[in-house]
Image (cartoon, rainbow, N blue to C red):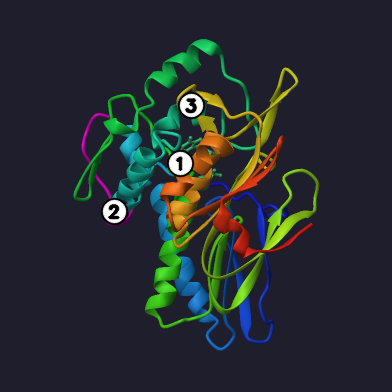
Amino acid sequence: MRARISLLFLILALSCSKEKYTKRTYLAMGTVVNITVPADSPDAADSAFLAIHLVDSLMNPISPLSDVNRINGNSGRWVRVSPYTARCIRRALEIAELTEGAFDPTVGRLVHLFHFDRAPDFRMPPEDSLRIARDYVDFRKIEVSGDSVRIGRGQQITLAAIAKGFAVDLACEKLDSMGVTGYIVEAGGDLRVRMPEGAKIGIRSPRGEGLFGVLRLRKGAVCTSGDYERFFYFRGKRYSHIIDPHTGQPVEGELSVTVIGPDATTVDALSTALFVMGSAKGLELLQELKSYEALFIEAEGVNMSPGFRKYLEEVF
Ligand code: AMP
Ligand code: MG
């Protein structure tokens, strides 16, 4: 993936004791990756980053040899992939089912038409090509058997809405297995924390430069899907880079959705799905998902699931 260096992180990890921890910065998955580990074992960050680099090489949409591109280049046929890719796609399918297709990895053709995989040159494609691409959206046509994957003939998948979370989880699993008990792994604003003393995490205000508020979290993941970093205007209307798979159109009107939960894979995919669903339907779904909480910042106002509030330390 092309490196997209952004000073405007969706979420900023604000504070943890400077003497006790050290932070290393890398580029992967088209964004900046920050890994904070105890100062007495700084190399643990490099080991964790290797996991992120691996996920990038398997799931990026650019390299012809990535698993995602091999799957897309062989639509209709079984493709042997890495066990990590198979695991990520299995989880993607579960979340697609759970969200009734608000999250759907088969929006690949649409993503490509809008150039959402080629930021910053987003565009509104012609209506007839949109209609064709929309007909290929159906996550139920993806099959996974062992470490092999088959998508429907002509379908194209993207894992852009889940791969960052998956990579963060893999890096955290690595740190856990090394006995590291305090860390923050963050990729382009999507992060997972394990910090006994708690970490402060800023949620960016979707309009303007400031923060909406600050969260405090000891253990868990936080991801945001927003319309403020990646968007375009067409005939005076502002469109986000997130597509409603049911209409084939980019979502309008949602500003940002921040999700908290135990694992970054689910939280990443859920933030995209809830962005499509909006707060009314999204809050209903969250009632069934006990471990996940969300904050919706919308033009009409701010809504959150009841459990989100307990993580909010400050609101500006
Ligand atoms: P995120 O920033 O995690 O919400 O991911 C958004 C990216 O995922 C977009 O740039 C697209 O590449 C892709 N995408 C857009 N809409 C969807 C959707 N409804 N389901 C799955 N992936 C999507
Ligand atoms: Mg996402």
- Of residues 257 and 130, the one drawn nearer to the viewer in this rendering: 257
Q: Position of residue 29 (x, y in %)?
A: 52, 52
Q: Which residue is mark 3?
A: 110
Task: Confirm or reject: label 3 Cβ below 8 Å from ligand 1.
Answer: yes
Of labels 1 and 2, earlier in sequence is 1
The C terminus lies in quadrant? bottom right
Residue sitting at x 63%, y 30%? 122
**Relative to 280, does residue 315 appear above or below in the rendering?**
below
Residue sitting at x 43%, y 52%? 266
Q: Which residue is mark 2?
A: 82
Q: Mark 3: few, some, or many residues within 10 Å (few <14, many ≥20)?
A: many
C-alpha gap between disc 1 and disc 2: 16 Å
The image quarter containing residue 149 is top left
Q: Position of residue 140 (x, y in %)?
A: 29, 32
Secondary element under disc 3, as helix, strand or loop, is helix
Tell me which amino acid carries mark 3.
Leu
Of labels 3 and 2, earlier in sequence is 2
Which labelled disc corresponds to residue 279?
A: none
Magenta stretch in the rendered image: 75-84
Q: Is residue 108 magenta?
A: no
Q: Position of residue 298 (x, y in %)?
A: 68, 38
**Relative to 146, does residue 220 appear above or below in the rendering?**
below
Q: Which residue is mark 1?
A: 61
- Discs 1, 2 touching: Cβ within 8 Å: no
Of labels 1 and 3, earlier in sequence is 1
Tell me which amino acid carries mark 2.
Ser
The image quarter containing residue 169 is bottom left
Tell me which amino acid carries mark 1.
Pro
The image quarter containing residue 135 is top left
Closer to the eye: label 3 or 2: 3
Q: Is residue 77 magenta?
A: yes
